[in-house]
Image (cartoon, rainbow, N blue to C red):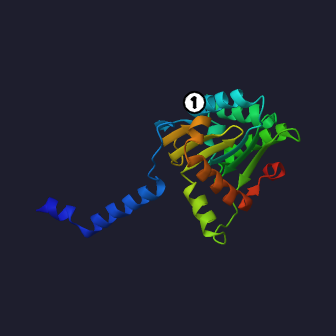
Amino acid sequence: MTTANKVSSPDLINRVIELRNKMLKAVPVRYYPPAAEHFSFAALSSVLCPRLETEFHKAVKTTHPVIYVIGNEGAYLEKKGKERWKNFLNDWGVTGKAEIHYLLLSPQPTVLPIIKALLDTAGAKGKLTFYKRPASISHLPVAVKESLERWETHHFLISKNPKALWVEGNHPAGSPNAYDCAFFNSDACEGSPDWDIYHNTVKTVWPYLQKIDPSELA
């Protein structure tokens, strides 16, 4: 009788519903086409970087990659022994071989000196730009506001010239891994609507972002 009462408790039921709704909001239900590589969990530095570099090296002689990245805290920039992501930004964005636009929604204070060092090194020759969201987003168009809120845990990278797409269905704050991830190489992008969907969202949101000036980080 006691167990039955606990299970049917309105407070418990409401709590379960609340937790379920939070999970559904944080973790979008995803269907990835067969052509995309799917990972139940992954680290950006070890899984994405080698695949993205392979795509770029195949195309870099004839094209100039343009990349948009959405992250939250920027923890990968300071992880010891996990420097591959920072090296990627340096090798491609700082040198100007690719144009990289990087949004960090809530960068950790310890990451700011690293961002400044990358931007200072890039100088005029580099094509690496960091962005932040406005201090208040309440006045933004609904679609922009909802995207920025969703991107706190739903991260991605999209590139053109060549086309590539990396999606993290759920990357909880503070977690070294992202969950429900997928990588679309150029062939997979051509055969799926996903690249266009993410690219259109980027075009909608990016005009409302603010560039990070290195002088702000001094």
Q: Is residue 4 left or right of residue 183?
A: left
| Residue located farthest toward the bottom when viewing the structure as drawn | 139
Label 1 environment density (alpha carbons within 10 Å; few <14, some 14–19, many ≥20): few
Residue 143 appears in which quarter of the rendering? bottom right
What element does badge 1 sit on?
helix
Q: What residue type is labelled 1?
A: Ser
Residue depicted at x 68% and y 50%: 103
| Residue located farthest toward the right when viewing the structure as drawn | 124
Do we see residue 23 in this rendering? yes
Instruction: Estimate the x, y position of residue 108 in percent, counting from the top left.
Output: 65, 48
Q: Is residue 25 left or right of residue 134?
A: left
The residue wearing badge 1 is 46
In this picture, is 139 found above or below 30?
A: below
Picture quarter with the N terminus? bottom left
Instruction: Estimate the x, y position of residue 13 in percent, counting from the top left.
Output: 28, 65
Residue depicted at x 56% and y 48%: 194
Do we see residue 185 in this rendering? no
Instruction: Estimate the x, y position of residue 116 in percent, counting from the top left.
Output: 78, 43
Instruction: Estimate the x, y position of residue 113 in percent, counting from the top left.
Output: 75, 43
Total numbered badges shown on the rendered structure: 1
Q: Is residue 185 left or right of residue 128?
A: left
Residue depicted at x 61% and y 50%: 196
Q: Nearer the viewer, residue 147 or 174?
A: 147
Q: Which of 73 and 52 is in front in this view?
A: 52
Q: Which of 17 and 140 is in front in this view?
A: 140
